Amino acid sequence: MYGDPMNPTVPPSDPAVSGSPPAATSEAQRRVDTPQAVVPHVPVKELRPLWVTWFAHPFANWFWFYFGFVVALSGSNMKYPSSGPVVIVAWLTGHLVNAKHPWGEIKLLLASMGIGYVLDGIVTRMGVLKFHEPSSWWWPIPLWMVMMWPNFAGTLNSSMKWLRGRYRIGAFLGAIAGPFSYYGGVKWGSVDLGWGFWPAMIVIGIEWALAMPALLWLSARWVPGPEISDQGTAVSV
């Protein structure tokens, strides 16, 4: 048969032979070729109360650490020794709410309490430090002094995180800054030095030269994050 009765020489049109795609195929091809509009993904920020975000910034972290330090010393001098631990527990609670690894932070805070309880207790037994509060819990240091250690440990992964992995620098800073922080307690009238200024400073400096690397090591072990070597390069934790 011929496709055109008026012109017998023209064969009937066959889509498979002529190569012309069906209308449905052409429409589907156009839909595929047409670029689709891409809607950008906008991450939704988690809204937190303002009082919570006050503890997240490194500057705020350092402020609350120093505030707890001052309240603990002044509270002891003014016969309100419990005021320091209350303030320290309060700001550390806000710190833990913002922490990415709160359980690691909790272990670090508890470990720092244990380290301070033992080391400051030994130094006090040696007669280097003399506290005004009577000892009532089988060790010569008061509670506000024990709480100074987690008060400082709360800065290791925030305002002091640049010390991660820098154990020698940490030991050096501990040997220098540690004794003078205790001397600040002497000036506030919260503690006395039993061995004189320089002998006490040397003993406390040795104490903190040992304590700082231990705290930094525990921080890197329990709180994941980029660890910085003493040469300033990042190493895996």
Image (cartoon, rainbow, N blue to C red):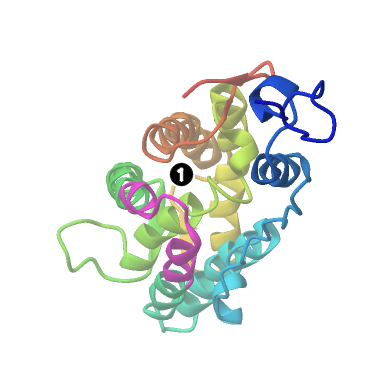
Up-down: is 163 above or below 191?
A: above
What is the secondary structure assignment of the residue under circle 1? Answer: loop
Task: Farthest residue to the left: give it.
Answer: 138
Whether residue 104 is visible, yes or no, is yes
Q: Position of residue 234 (x, y in %)?
A: 62, 22
Q: Which residue is mark 1?
A: 195
Is the N terminus in the top left, top right, bottom left or bottom right quadrant?
A: top right
Left or right of 80 on screen, residue 37: right
The spot of residue 181 in percent (x, y) is 58, 52
Q: Quadrant of residue 197?
A: top right
| Residue 189 in sight from this viewpoint | no
Question: Percent from the top left, x then y, of residue 132?
Answer: 37, 69
Query: In the visual, does 145 lie left or right of 166?
Result: left
Is residue 184 shown left or right of residue 99?
Answer: right
Residue stretch rendered in magenta on the structure: 91-107
Secondary structure mainly formed by the magenta segment: helix
Task: Please name the residue shown 35% across and 43% down the image.
Answer: 123
- Membership of 102 in magenta stretch: yes
Q: Can you say whether 25 is above or below 68 in the image?
A: above
Q: Residue 17: x, y in percent?
A: 69, 20
Residue 218 shown left or right of residue 39 in the figure: left
Q: Residue 194, relative to residue 68: is it above or below?
A: above
Say what amino acid the circle numbered 1 marks. Answer: Trp
Depth check: give the residue in front, 191 or 161.
161
Residue 135 lies in quadrant: bottom left
- Counting labels gives 1
